Amino acid sequence: MSTQVHANLTAEQVTQISEELDEPEWLLETRLDAYEALDSLDMPDVIRTPGRDWTNLDALDYETLVDPLEWEQEKDRVDAESVDVLSWADALEQHGELIEAQFGSIVDPQRDYLTALSTALFSAGTVVYVPEGVDAEDVKIRTTMNSRSLFNYTLVVAEESSSVTILERQTTGTNVDGEQYYSGVVEVAAEENSSVQYGTLQNLDDDSYNFQVKRGHADTYATVDWIEGNIGSRLTKSNVETRLLGDASESQIVGAFFGHEDQHFDIASRVWHEAEHTTADLVTRGVLDDAARSVYEGVQDVGREAWDTNSYQRENTLMLSDESEADASPKLIINNHDTEASHSATVGQVDEEDMFYMTSRSVDPESAENMLVEGFFVPVFEEIAVDELRDDLDDLVVERLRE
């Protein structure tokens, strides 16, 4: 597995990337440590259900997909008043000490093989710094991948009593042919009484492989909310996670996906309740057509000191084809009796009674099914407070239905 990448990856190449980005010595050492750890690290854990491994990350041809020194992208950053939304080089120059303190403190650079690979090779970076007391909306990060592979890193730091809403888009450029590999790591540090809402809309080319890890730490009275829309890519392996470290901290993870042809989604959401009076809500809805496949795992982990916990989870998948496949594995790990928690998951096809009701009123079957699919996503759309993200995701769902 690892020798595939090592065949065209050297420590000299890792050093060259760091030098081209004019990085400090500590960051080069972090990259090289991640590179050296590749031999001993396993692939990320994939979701397993009895008798089946749904996702095979070892089967990807990383030697062909990953060119360490060839990266090309279009990065459009839109900031808000009093908020720094910076390229990696500018952020290191202006906030070097902050980055040194935060980098790798939330997502372990050697968490697994693919995360370490991203740590060693990332070339596309953005830092969002929200000073104390600042309220900001409409921060945007638009990434267009114009190379065979792209490794992206994003750091968000929201200081005490601040708030920020971030919308990230990921697409593939028109001049990229063949298979591609996109890797993204996001770290969010939400300090006391701060609020971060991070929305992602992934619409990469159907010939791409997509690996992403997003993780946030919420301090006392802080909120970290995630919105993740997955429409593109051939294979997506996504982990969205929050650690509720401070009393009365909160997190919501909202997800939506729509697969067709032979797309495969491996999606995991996880929340750790580690303090008192914490609240979490996990909501995911997906639709599968053709021979698309999905597997979802949601975990609510309530620690021993997490008194007065509220934690809820629901996942629903709608299958439009007899050839599509889906599975869901919601889990509760409860180590404190003072907890209100629930989880649910459903997998099924379009309701025959609903179809009959609509077709009996002169709605043709295709239009009826499309209307039911749009209605199926409404509970997720209602949870998305960012109007632009909600509208864009709705437009992509409608576009997919017309294909």
Image (cartoon, grey):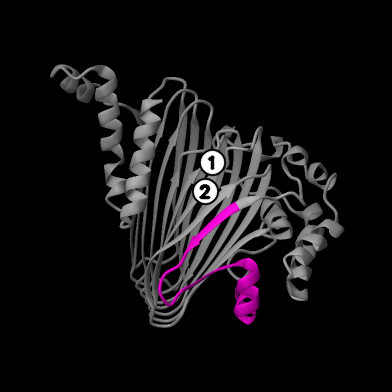
Residue sticking out furthest to the left: 361
Q: Is residue 36 magenta?
A: no
Total marks drawn? 2
Q: Are marks 2 and 1 in contact (CB under 8 Å)?
A: yes
Quarter holding the C terminus is top left
Q: CA distance from mark 2 to mark 1?
A: 6 Å
Q: Secondary structure at mark 2?
A: strand
Which residue is the site of mark 1?
204
Residue 277: x and y in percent read 34, 72
Q: Secondary structure at mark 1?
A: loop
Q: Which segment is the magenta one?
A: 74-103
Whether residue 338 is visible, yes or no, is: yes
Task: Of the two numbered discs 2 and 1 on the same chain, state the one appearing first in sequence.
Answer: 2
Residue 284 shown left or right of residue 21 in the figure: left
Q: Which mark is residue 112?
A: none
Label 2 is placed on what type of residue?
Gln
Which residue is rendered at x = 62% and y = 56% of the image?
152
Q: Is residue 303 above or below residue 357?
A: below
Q: Is residue 303 above or below residue 100?
A: above
Residue 237: x and y in percent read 57, 44
